[in-house]
């Protein structure tokens, strides 16, 4: 019998996508996902190091696993991701029942390290300081039948004083456009309708091969792929945002009118201390240009409250920018000190009570704006890509949930004459919004239209896409060939 595995993922979209790679690697090595309430043979913790409580979360999970390890010594526990990259051998010192520790640069080593740990009957710690192989050259078992992540770069060249990511993910490494497009095509061939282009800073894409307009070109090229209905991307950096990207978003039919662009602070003084390389006027000018080109665009952001030295005046500047930008939503965070970052040793660390009070004021303002914008959609018919598990109360309300083209969460009632058979995750429905809340929309009337899709067929059959590693590395833009041909590494564009 094959050994079973379970992956527990913490943190950002990059980690979620890495976990898909880990699942693909394990299944290629003969492992099978654990089913039901069965105990897995291998537990993999894919960790995050961005927030202050990341360490507590990891060691809390490891503490809960210790009795299982004591009861079953053959259980293997592996720790990967950003916290593993940071803490390295410290993990097995604090939790000696851990079998494998691997970093962000060598996720492809996991099956070998598990086998080596079993053979040698001792923990294996392998952390590389630079990328061993681009993650997208590895197989991936996808989480969704209808939507997929596609990494266009890894790492980051920015030096934000609050962020530990560059030291853990390394300098930016870009994939060649043909490589990216080949992976998108592979997902579409599996029935996927939507892809999200993923990078720590997607709009600096092209820095490695000297094309500052590469990201806009990539968006346009994705528009040429037949069967790809939605393209999203996350996250861009305001300092690298160029007008050609806005034009590509507006002119490419399948690129969604949704933009998630981190603000972090509305104070120019704080932005300077954060080393964010733009100021509030620059940020707002991008927002204005996006709305001029796409009046229906939903713009969301990230904001940090309580950065060291932030004054009440600085905080008021953030509130002013939020009022002017009118974000449809925001991920708001209280500043979290991370050892190893310049901000951790800055003077004027703010008291918790001050940060909490400002945080609550920001959330109150943003929720009022989100609610106002969502109310404007009541009465409109929206296109919804049906998801799975997005509505926590769906079972009680007899609704289903999915995302509109602008990224908003929509709960709808899957009834009406337009419904053909049953509505499945991966299907497309059109529904009329009857109610708005700050974080979601409700469409309780009959469905206006329903289109069954291949993604819905796969979801109904319990089939999730599994894509092989893509190693094309084509240097040009355009839809990939039907039958990919490997480009020899000698031409400078081979697999990284």
Image (cartoon, helix red, strand yellow):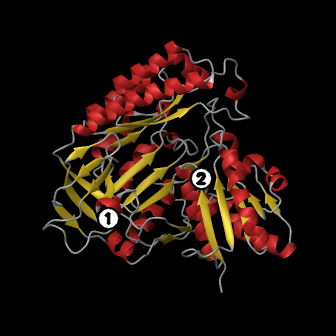
Report the side of 178 relative to 444 (left or right). right
Mark 1 surroundings within 10 Å by alpha-carbon count, few (fewer than 14), some (14 through 19), many (20 or more)? some
Instruction: Give the x, y percent position of residue 151.
Output: 52, 54
Disc nearer the start of the sequence (2/1): 2
- Mark 2 highlights which residue? 10
- Residue at the extreme left: 417
Mark 2 surroundings within 10 Å by alpha-carbon count, few (fewer than 14), some (14 through 19), many (20 or more)? some
User: Element type at marker 1?
Assistant: loop
Q: Nearer the viewer, residue 91 or 12?
A: 91
Give the residue at x 69% y 74%. Answer: 41
Q: Nearer the viewer, residue 115 or 309?
A: 309
What separation in Å lies between label 2 and label 1 (alpha carbons)? 32 Å
Viewer-nearest of labels 2 and 1?
2
Give the residue at x 43% y 47%. Answer: 233
- Residue at the extreme bottom: 1
- Mark 1 highlights which residue? 227
Asked whether the viewer can see residue 128, the reply is yes
Quarter assignment of residue 172:
top right
């Amino acid at each position: 019998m094959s050994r079973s595995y379970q992956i527990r993922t913490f943190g950002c979209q990059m980690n979620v996508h890495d976990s898909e790679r880990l699942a693909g690697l394990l299944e290629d090595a003969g492992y099978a996902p654990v089913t039901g309430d069965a105990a897995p043979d291998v537990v993999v913790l894919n960790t995050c190091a961005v927030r202050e409580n990341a360490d507590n979360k990891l060691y809390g999970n490891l503490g809960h696993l210790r009795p299982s390890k004591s009861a079953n010594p053959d259980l293997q526990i592996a720790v990967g991701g950003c916290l593993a990259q940071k803490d390295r051998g410290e993990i097995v010192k604090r939790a000696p029942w851990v079998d494998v520790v691997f970093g962000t640069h060598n996720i492809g080593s996991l099956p070998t390290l598990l086998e080596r740990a079993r053979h040698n009957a001792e923990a294996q710690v392998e952390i590389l300081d630079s990328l061993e192989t681009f993650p997208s050259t590895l197989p991936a078992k996808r989480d969704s039948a209808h939507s997929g992540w596609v990494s266009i770069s890894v790492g980051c060249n920015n030096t934000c004083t609050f962020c530990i990511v560059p030291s853990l993910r390394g300098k930016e490494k870009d994939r060649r456009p043909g490589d990216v497009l080949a992976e998108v095509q592979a997902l579409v061939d599996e029935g996927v309708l939507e892809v999200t282009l993923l990078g720590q800073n997607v709009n600096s894409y092209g820095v490695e091969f000297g094309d500052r307009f590469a990201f806009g070109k990539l968006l346009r090229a994705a528009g040429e792929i037949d069967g790809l209905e939605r393209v999203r991307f996350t996250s861009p950096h305001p300092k690298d945002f160029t007008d050609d990207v806005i034009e590509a978003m507006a002119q490419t039919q399948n690129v969604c009118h949704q933009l998630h662009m981190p603000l972090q602070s509305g104070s120019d003084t704080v932005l300077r201390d954060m080393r964010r390389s733009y100021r509030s006027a620059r940020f707002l000018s991008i927002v204005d240009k996006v709305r001029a080109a796409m009046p229906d665009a939903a713009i969301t952001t990230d904001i940090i409250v309580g950065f060291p030295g932030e004054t009440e005046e600085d905080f008021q500047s953030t509130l002013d920018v939020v009022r002017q930008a009118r974000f449809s939503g925001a991920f708001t965070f209280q500043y979290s000190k991370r050892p190893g970052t310049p901000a951790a040793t800055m003077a004027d660390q703010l008291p918790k009570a001050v940060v909490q009070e400002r945080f609550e004021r920001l959330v109150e303002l943003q929720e009022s704006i989100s609610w106002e914008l969502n109310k404007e959609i009541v009465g409109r018919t929206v296109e919804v890509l049906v998801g799975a598990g997005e509505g926590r109360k769906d079972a009680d309300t007899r609704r289903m949930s999915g995302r509109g083209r602008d990224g908003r969460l929509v709960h709808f009632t899957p009834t009406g004459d337009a419904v053909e058979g049953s509505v499945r995750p991966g299907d497309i429905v059109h529904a009329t919004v009857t109610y708005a809340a700050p974080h979601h929309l409700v469409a309780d009337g009959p469905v206006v239209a329903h289109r069954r899709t291949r993604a819905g067929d796969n979801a109904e059959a319990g089939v999730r896409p599994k894509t092989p590693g893509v190693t094309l590395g084509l240097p040009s833009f355009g839809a990939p060939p039907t039958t990919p041909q490997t480009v020899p590494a000698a031409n400078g564009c081979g697999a990284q």
